[in-house]
Amino acid sequence: MTDKLQLAKQNVEAFGKGDWASFKAPLSADAVYEELATQRRTQGPDAIVEISKGWRQAFPDAKGTITKAVESGDTVVLEIIWEGTHNGELKSAMGSIPATYKRVKIPAVQVVTFKGDKIAETKHYFDLMTILAQIGALPVPATA
């Protein structure tokens, strides 16, 4: 396993443990984190940690299981299954959603770009509608 692949995986594991020092360590000083589903984009290790802490506050037992990892050049792509229980307030564009104590399980992809041995950018793709439906914040779609 290359250093880049290992660092990207360790970042997901550090998030799952709430180990913010280890989560922040591989981020470059000008690292960018973008969540396409929420349209949030932030820059700098401290700001990235704060967004991540918000997710951990809403889902304190959140854990990512990496199901596939691919590396090409300066980029690592991770397929992740995120699981957790909505035990805390979730701050969203719709306002705050109080804890529902419901479990979520969603697939996601992170595209992690490196500059040297530091994470320069992470684009996180996940289905926000599925999260909201699973916690009961949206009606569940009818099935055929």
Image (tube, rainbow, N blue to C red):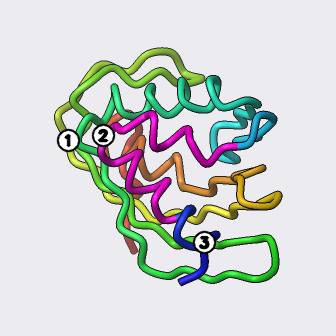
Between marks 3 and 1 in the image, the one whose residue lies nearer the viewer: 3
**In the depicted view, which residue is nearer to us: 130 or 56?**
56
Q: CA distance from mark 3 to mark 1?
A: 36 Å
Circle 2: element type = loop
* Position of residue 62 measured from the top left corner of the image (x, y, whole percent): 30, 46
Q: Is 125 located above or below residue 72 in the figure?
A: above
Q: Is 25 located above or below residue 13 in the figure?
A: above
Is label 1 in contact with label 2 (beta carbons under 8 Å)?
A: yes
Circle 1: element type = loop
Task: Please tell me how crowded label 1 is: few (under 14), some (14-19), or many (20+) other residues with Cα within 10 Å.
Answer: few
Q: Which mark is residue 135?
A: 2
Q: Is 5 located above or below residue 136 in the figure?
A: below
Is label 2 in contact with label 3 (beta carbons under 8 Å)?
A: no
The residue to which callout 1 is attached is 102
The residue to which callout 3 is attached is 3
In the image, what residue occupies the spot 54% across and 23% down?
A: 50
Q: Amino acid at mark 2?
A: Ile
Q: Amino acid at mark 1?
A: Lys
Q: Earlier in the sequence, mark 3 or mark 1?
A: 3
Magenta part of the chain: 9-27
